[in-house]
Amino acid sequence: MYTEERRAIYKKAIKAWGFDAQARVCQEECAELITAIFHLSRGRENAIMEVVEELADTYIMVGQIMEYIGPDIVEHVVDCKLSNVEERLSKEENENEN
């Protein structure tokens, strides 16, 4: 959930450590999430918790990047992309019914 309290923390982190540093950390967290998802797909023991931990870290860093860029524009693009997903799903459902 993208709350005002979280937004304040994200802004504070960007101000304290700078965008460039936080962007690098975001890249690192994304890479760690990719690895964790790979482990999950390979059936590694405890992989679910590994994914959960990395999702949380990535979510926090993405929140900071969103705050830097502007969350409204990001949310608008997310809505557009979800609309596209919904349209594709609807088309697939219609094709499967025929």
Image (cartoon, rainbow, N blue to C red):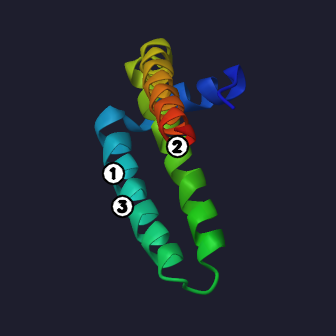
Work out whether mark 3 precedes mark 2 in sequence or the reverse, and give the earlier one. Answer: 3
Callout 2: 10 Å neighbours few (<14), some, many (20+)?
Answer: few
Q: Nearer the viewer, mark 3 or mark 2?
A: 2
Can you give x and y, in whole percent of width and height, for residue 96 in the image? 52, 43
The quarter holding residue 35 reads: bottom left
Is residue 9 positioned above or below 76 on the image? below
Tell me how far mark 1 sits from mark 2, CA to CA: 39 Å
Q: Are marks 1 and 3 in contact (CB under 8 Å)?
A: yes
Is residue 63 positioned above or below 81 on the image? below
SS type, badge 2: helix
Residue 96 is marked as 2
Can you give x and y, in whole percent of width and height, for residue 38 in the image? 43, 72
Residue with the mark numbered 3? 31
Residue with the mark numbered 1? 27
Can you give x and y, in whole percent of width and height, for residue 92 in the image? 48, 38
- From this viewpoint, is residue 89 visible? yes
- Camera-nearest residue between 23 and 34: 34
Q: Are marks 1 and 2 in contact (CB under 8 Å)?
A: no
Callout 1: 10 Å neighbours few (<14), some, many (20+)?
Answer: some
Callout 3: 10 Å neighbours few (<14), some, many (20+)?
Answer: some
SS type, badge 1: helix
